[in-house]
Image (cartoon, rainbow, N blue to C red):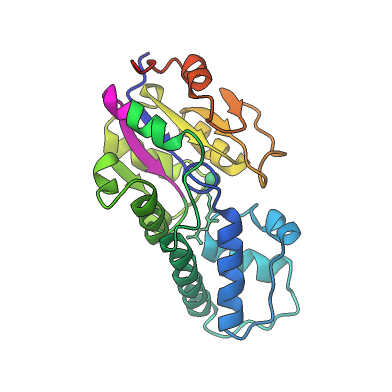
Amino acid sequence: MTIKAIIFDVDGTLADTEDAHRIAFNKAFAESNLDWNWNVELYDKLLKVTGGKERIKYYVSDFNTAYKKPDNFDDFVKHLHLTKTKHYTAMLAAGQIPLRPGIRQLIDDARAVGITLAIATTTSPENVAGLLEVGIGKDWESYFAANGCGDIVPAKKPAPDIYNWVLDKLKLAPAECIALEDSYNGLRSAMAAGIKTYVTTNPYTHWHDFDGAAGIFEDLSDLAAFYKTTGLPLPKR
Ligand code: XBP
Ligand code: MG
């Protein structure tokens, strides 16, 4: 079957963002007078849960059980997460987080041969916009036929919901698409939606179980190898 669309995960796939997320969480904690600090080792464990608000709740329930939750805990988490998003998007706007090797070229090559592009991520819409405004340009939205992100679906990855939402928007069958992911949760999500999934690893995810992936790459610096594995048409360069 010819590939009609590539669906991209964002965090860890389009860019190595997770450490910036971690730093932004810590800035939000400091600004909110919380003595919480997420180091790399802890964040590695916290990544088990996708979504920033969900991750904060997971931290409180499983790693900081001594913390006495305020009565309005949901609102507290929402506000804390908004503060985190403010810090994270400031880091993006400062140009601190580039796209990963090969990503910009892949986007251009795919467009040149008429392959549809889409996004399926658990991260907040502001974060996707901030990353791609810098990485692609102000007109980044016109590159993607569907932009599935954040709370648009209630169940985040590893649930298939965000991929199903994107497939619905694209009006394509799973077999007509491929997904690009970087993590165990992302791979499970795309595969549960029936989509053939390729993985690029990063320092936070290289040890994950990628059983079922159609191909695993360290990054896309060798795009020719990626095109060969996926069967995507080689660009005429
Ligand atoms: C990414 C996430 C996100 C980010 C933080 O997972 O889990 O939660 O870490 O972003 P994936 P928010 O790459 O599988 O989409 O704080 O905006 O949720
Ligand atoms: Mg990811």
Residue at 62%, 37% in the rendered image: 201
Q: Is residue 111 magenta?
A: yes
Q: Is residue 12 magenta?
A: no
> Where ligand 2 lies, by image quadrant?
top right
Percent position (x, y) of residue 45?
71, 55
Q: Judge whether residue 166 can be spotted in this image.
A: yes
Write down the region rendered in magenta: 110-121
Residue at 60%, 28% in the rendered image: 217
Percent position (x, y) of residue 35?
69, 81
Residue at 28%, 21% in the rendered image: 113
Give above or below for 15 relative to 101: below
Residue at 75%, 58% in the rendered image: 41
Nearer to us in this view, 36 or 100: 100
Nearer to us in this view, 46 or 173: 46
Give above or below for 149 relative to 27: above
Percent position (x, y) of residue 140?
29, 47
Q: Quadrant of the image for the N terminus?
A: top left
Percent position (x, y) of residue 82?
45, 72
Q: Quadrant of the image for the C terminus?
A: top left
